[in-house]
Amino acid sequence: MRSPSHLVTLLLLVCPATVLAQTDPQTASLGRRLKQGAEPEHRVQAARLLGESEDPEALPLLCAGLEDAAAEVRAASAQALEKLGELGGVECLEARKEEPDAAARAAVESAVGKLRQLKARPPKFYVLLNEVKDTTGTLPPELVKATEARMRRKLTQEGAWLAPAKEGEAEAKGVLRKHKIQGYRLTAEIRPGASGGLMLAVMCTRYPGKLQLLGSIQVQASGAEPYELLWALAPEAITETAASFKWK
């Protein structure tokens, strides 16, 4: 049985680089190639790689790709948004419903259908994720925001519905009653690792209502750049939280 408070260590120093998937600089580089690539085939390849990146930061880059002058790039961007699976892509895809090219329009319609289907899935649990805090004082704000976005992505993949930041208690309880699910509040902090590197600590309480602490988890990693460490830690923290508190 898991303890309500425990530490998981990821030794990224001994992991092959491919385990880290795409990193922030790679996403930015692909975004530049999608926007500025001299040939359409180069921009198509960038869109495909962004779709496979599992990086929520790829979303606005691919939405911009829907406006490309080349129809094949617009089609590839729509296909990549479907592959990426970020629900926020619905809005920019729906804005292209009058796409003039038949192949690109079919890709847009397919992506909208897939994302709507994902959005309509019954929730397994309801989560309010508070703003992630950086207690190290050394990380760029955009990296902290990216860590929060990756945690949200993992929560969605686990079957969570995400509560809005300023939701009223009565409204939250209504969601729980309607769907017969449990609600949780997560408060996450990025801290210095015990022996170097970084730690992501997550406190889990009941939601909504008065503070009812369920416990906390800490995951830490070392041996790589901060963006690589947080790339690995963000989804791992959600996985460990879900397992520790038996989310269903």
Image (cartoon, helix red, strand yellow):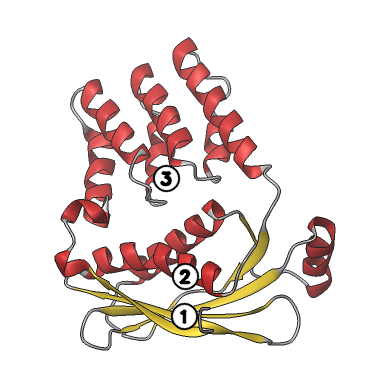
Q: Amino acid at mark 1?
A: Ile
Task: Using the image, determine if residue 137 lies above or below residue 25.
Answer: below
- Of 183 and 63, which appears nearest the observer? 183
Tell me whether circle 2 and circle 3 mark residues in contact (CB < 8 Å): no
Q: Position of residue 109 (x, y in %)?
A: 56, 23
102 on left or right of 37: right
Query: Circle 3 — which element?
Result: helix
Residue located 51% across and 74% down the image: 131
156 w.r.t. 146: above or below:
above
Q: Which residue in the protein does label 2 denote? A: 240
Q: Residues within 10 Å of mark 2 (few under 14, many from 20)?
A: many
Who's the residue at 68% across and 87% down the image? 211
Does dot 1 land on a helix, a strand or a loop? Answer: strand
Q: Which mark is residue 60?
A: 3
Q: Label 3: how many residues lie within 10 Å, few (<14), some (14-19) or many (20+)?
A: some
Instruction: Say which quarter of the image contains residue 221.
Output: bottom left
Q: Which circle's residue, 2 or 1, is located before the other in the chain?
A: 1
